[in-house]
Image: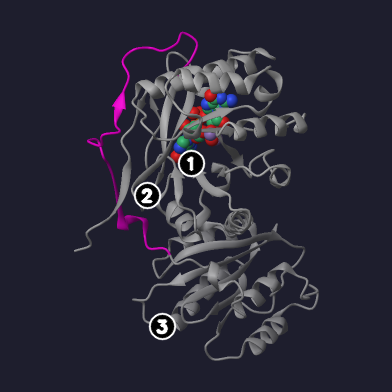
Amino acid sequence: MLTTIIYRSHYRDHVPVTVLEDMVVAANKKNSEAGVSGILLFNGKLFFQLLEGPEESVRAIYRAICEDPRHHNVVELLCDYSPSRRFGKCGMELFDLRRYDPEVVLQNVLDKGTTKYQLTYNDRSLQFFRTFVEESEKENYFELPSGEQWDFIADNDAPSVRSLTRRYSEVCNFAFQPIIDPLAREIVSLEALIRTPEGAMSRNWFEGYVGDELYEADLKSKSVAFAMASALGLGDQSLSVNLLPMTLVNVPNAVSYLIQEIEANGLVPEQIVVEFTENEVISRLDEFTGAVRELKAAGIGVTIDHFGGGFAGLLLLAQFQPDRIKINRDLIRDVHKSGPRQAIVLAIIKCCTALEILISVVGVEQPEEWMWLESAGISHFQGHLFAHPQLAGIPPVSWPEPRDTF
Ligand code: C2E
Ligand code: MN
Ligand code: MN
């Protein structure tokens, strides 16, 4: 299938620009053998390239491009399919934007288009050329250093690192994972994640329940989370717990139960945050919204979890505004390499900034994901990069340290 890939990248400063022409000649030979054609733009700092050809060849060449040390921060902007080549006439044409007017370049790009393929300004690919040439998205092109520039070393001696020896319940257990502000070196909150008594994953615990039993068990398990947090010596540290939205709707007096259990364990409502995990549609939205109001009236914080994944959507933000949202791992996996993910995350940030809603991100595993998200303006993170959840304990945090480059 005829495939188009567009990417942009940052040129590595230490490579002399004079090698550019040779580079294009060499690439051209390789590309034409593989039946891949396209256009390359360079503005002295950034590359922008469209590749088109048979799917396998385009993907193979793109993979090689991603590995090329002469550039970095390669971000895929578009991957699309079309009936015929947009730029069938040329092999791989290079335009140096420092030498021409934006309008001239765009006209040239249009002229290179094949007549059979109706190249119009409605074409997404062509719109990407325009955006790049006119630099209208420039502020979103974050230049990230290599992930190797950071060390992540577990702080085993931190006073927060603790674990419990006694078992607190026969029906469930909890693992705790910090949500941190890496640059401020601050633990923002601890999230209690449910486990089976033996410590198996949350999904194994959920499998033990059917129908309405689950909601009752979900609510009751929170008293175990509060007791464990209290025994861990939480102090005034914030604690986040998860609840299914329908737990609040289906179980009578759920909010009063929570408040009572918080206080019975020597905690205060203001240090508790409830994260709504949305694995099902909220079918009784009015009742749910009512319960959220009760939580807030008691001083308990509210977060929409898994934002952007599955059901948790923009519509919920219209219904009520939580204090915080957590962006789902599915959206931020490899965010530093993906134009679509970057666009979505930037839109979420814009929306939440307008509403003064704090954003945190779960599932950060790679230094580059973290660096991109920091550049985008997010400062609260949770993920294996910093700390794994620890059963019945508070794990050490691996704070990022700039690596000595001498
Ligand atoms: P969540 O609230 O988004 O919790 C974070 C999940 O991501 C946890 O999975 C955690 O172990 C995992 N995680 C954290 N960092 C990383 C990372 O860097 N990479 C990857 N791949 N995963 C990471 P866990 O504990 O299996 O929980 C899954 C979900 O189960 C939670 O997602 C939450 O929605 C739900 N859950 C957990 N405890 C409870 C509970 O007490 N009640 C309810 N209703 N739901 C719960
Ligand atoms: Mn959660
Ligand atoms: Mn999750």
Residue 269 vertical position relative to residue 169 in the rendered view, above or below: below
Q: Which residues are magenta?
A: 144-173
Image mark for residue 334: none
Q: Are marks 2 and 3 in contact (CB under 8 Å)?
A: no
The residue nearer to you, when weighing 387 against 267, is 267
Distance from disc 2 to disc 1, alpha carbons, whole Å, reads: 14 Å
Q: Amino acid at mark 2?
A: Pro
Is-magenta flag for residue 84? no
Label 1 residue near ligand 1, CB within 8 Å: yes
The residue that mark 2 highlights is 182
Residue 197: quarter of image: top left
Sequence order check, earlier mark of 2 and 3: 3
Residue 72 lies, in percent from the top left, at 43, 66
Task: Look at 65% across and 12% down and name the residue there.
Answer: 213
The residue that mark 3 highlights is 17
Label 3 residue near ligand 1, CB within 8 Å: no
Q: Amino acid at mark 1?
A: Gly
Principal SS element in the magenta part? Answer: loop
Task: Look at 46% across and 71% down and name the residue there.
Answer: 10
Distance from disc 2 to disc 3, alpha carbons, whole Å, reads: 37 Å
Task: Look at 69% across and 42% down and name the residue there.
Answer: 320
Sequence order check, earlier mark of 2 and 1: 2
- Whether residue 200 can be seen here: no
Left or right side of 325 for 280: right
- Whether residue 47 can be seen here: yes
Left or right side of 16 for 51: right
Residue 54 lies, in percent from the top left, at 65, 60
